[in-house]
Image: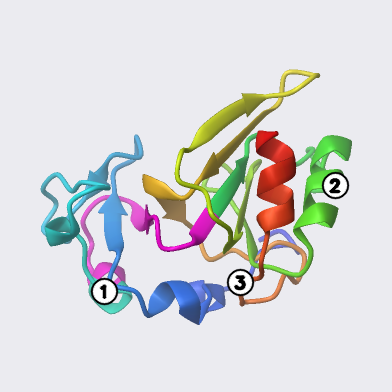
Amino acid sequence: MASHRASKADAVPAELRTRDRWVRHSATKVPLTTAGTAASSTDPRTWTTHEHASASSAGVGLGFVLDGDGIVCVDLDHALMPDDTPNPWAVEILRQAGSTYVEVSRSGTGLHVFGYADVRQGRRIRREGGYAVEVYGDGRFIAVTGQRFNGAPSTLADISALTAALTA
């Protein structure tokens, strides 16, 4: 296991674990209920607690639903180089994010930056160099790994300045 990865999903912040917005997901990142049927990122009747989702064997992993309450995720695709260090463009985004929960994505090459901000309309941003950044706060689910990146805290911080800069 790489040094930047936490051993268990206990690293997932309480701000996420205590909200009943958990689903499972398939290998192709389709949201599933704990029974293995289709879930929806916009239908709370298909969501459950972290405890129930964690206990389920449906699909291949956990997902957290963003519902517009101020918890957001900045998804950095291909942010890590083969030696597990962040690409230069990702270093700047992580610096701007400050001290908030960051995890390694399911692919092992991306990062999820979670925090608080007002993001209603999600955006996929293609930057110079071809890398992609996605900013979401509502109507999406994020495949959560619980693999903290480089000792990131297990708490969420205000990342409003970051999301404003990214979406400007």
Which quarter of the rendering shows the N terminus? Answer: bottom right
As shown in the figure, which amino acid type bears the numbered disc 2? Val
What distance separates the C-alpha of mark 3 from that of mark 1? 19 Å
Residue at point 27%, 47% (across, down):
41
- Residue 79 seen: no
Q: Which residue is mark 1?
A: 49
Q: Is residue 57 a member of the stretch shown in magenta?
A: yes
Kind of residue at disc 1: Thr
Q: Quadrant of residue 148?
A: bottom right
> Which is more N-terminal, label 3 or label 2?
2
Vertical placement of 51 versus 168: above or below?
below
From the image, tell me which residue sits under label 3.
156
Say whether residue 85 is visible: yes
Helix, strand or loop for disc 2: helix
Picture disc at residue 93: none
- 134 is higher (above) or lower (below) than 91: above
Which quarter of the image is occupied by the C terminus? top right
**What percent of the width, then of the height, locates residue 137?**
46, 50
Mark 2 Cα shell of 10 Å, populated few (<14), some (14-19), many (≥20):
some
Secondary structure found at label 1: loop
Q: Residue at x 85, y 55 (%)?
A: 95
Q: Earlier in the sequence, mark 2 or mark 1?
A: 1
Reading the image, the residue beneath label 2 is 91
What is the span of residues highlighted in magenta in the rendered image? 53-72
User: In x, y percent, where is residue 73?
Assistant: 54, 52
